[in-house]
Image (cartoon, helix red, strand yellow):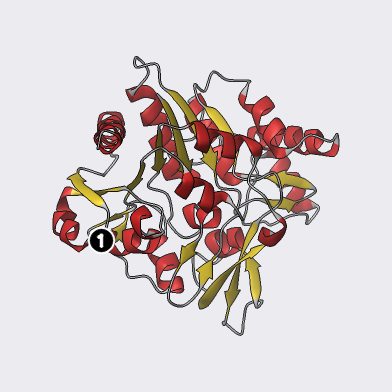
Amino acid sequence: MKIAVFAGGVGGGRFVTALRDATSNDGHEISVIANIGDDMWLSGLKICPDLDSIMYALAGVVDTSRGWGRRNETNRIAGELDAYEVGWPWFTLHDLDLATHIARTGMLHAGSTLSSATRQLASRWPIGVTLIPASDQSVETWVRLTDPNEPEYVHFEEWWVRLRGGGSPVSFHQKGVHFSNPSAGALRAISDAELIILAPSNPVVSIGTMLGFGGTKCSLSGIPGLRNAVRAAPAPVVGVSPIIQGAPVRGMADVCLNVVGTPVRSSEVAKTYGARSEGGLLDGWLVDTGDAQDLDRLSGVSGRAVPLLMSNRETAEALASEAVEFGLTLADR
């Protein structure tokens, strides 16, 4: 079976790794369409945090204590950059990770697309999936702030890392999104898929950057054409809730949901994604067993309550298996 997964960042990397491992004996072909909204240029280098986090997780080289970057890192180059007062002192680019950014930047300057550069970088390891950027064009997420002590607009990574979601945010903006197109690999993975999964990634700035997210206070339009491709796909679409009992599985999804005006509740995220039968994205929605009461709040979407917390390899693989099995039941209807 061909499976396409939309994912971003640390939680997405953990989920797709579990999906690959849980289905390794079933002959499934997995394509991971990764968020590019966190991407940026820094110190002359093209940085792709979500693509790299997913690649490192699949390769088994991620620093699990931090959840991102490479393990067994050193900081000699970062120290020199600080001495030269180059880059962001609060955004440390470690040495092994820097090699990835340098390699990618060289490929892009030589004329490669982001898709081909990602393919070459990932070929170093047997990651077991096809890793695809959602677009080959630049789409950066910026945050508008109302704190008088901060700039009016900052890149998402600055808001996320330096400000920790503070600065009185009022909206998200997708710089360059109107000039972007879905990558050819992403469109092919969607049209060929027999199951599409929305990983338990940040619904606003990861999944929403790719497919759009319409809050009551502000909306993200998503990469033009990508949402329609999912809606037109023959495969069932299963979403995995990133919210457990009113709190994010990981990260600051609750802060992002508050900015766009969506209540921090599993059923409310599903409502914003929308049912495919009503012009949205979802056919199925997995909630945590602690949120089983939310199943009655779903409209036009089949729901199932399962343990969502990926506390170890076994629980993560169990969740991935549940997502696939649920998708199969929807496909048979």
Taking the image as shown, residue 127 lies to the left or right of residue 179, namely left
Percent position of residue 76, x then y: 70, 38
Is label 1 in a helix, a strand or a loop?
Answer: loop
- Residue placed at 32% from the left, 66% from the top? 264
- Residue placed at 54% from the left, 74% from the top? 171
Residue position for label 1: 299
Percent position of residue 18, x then y: 36, 30
Query: Quadrant of the rendered structure where residue 271 is?
Result: bottom left
Q: Nearer the viewer, residue 316 or 193?
A: 193
Whether residue 66 can be seen here: no
Question: Measured along the vertical axis of the image, is residue 13 above or below residue 8?
Answer: above
Question: Measured along the vertical axis of the image, is residue 213 above or below residue 44?
Answer: below
Task: Give the class, few, some or many, for how many residues have Cα within 10 Å of label 1's Cα (few <14, many ≥20).
Answer: some
Percent position of residue 17, x then y: 42, 30
Percent position of residue 276, x then y: 37, 53
For badge 1, the amino acid type reads Ser
- Residue placed at 24% from the left, 35% from the top? 329
Question: Measured along the vertical axis of the image, is residue 199 above or below residue 174?
Answer: above
Residue lying at the far bottom in this picture: please name it. 148
Query: Quadrant of the rendered structure where residue 266 is?
Result: bottom left
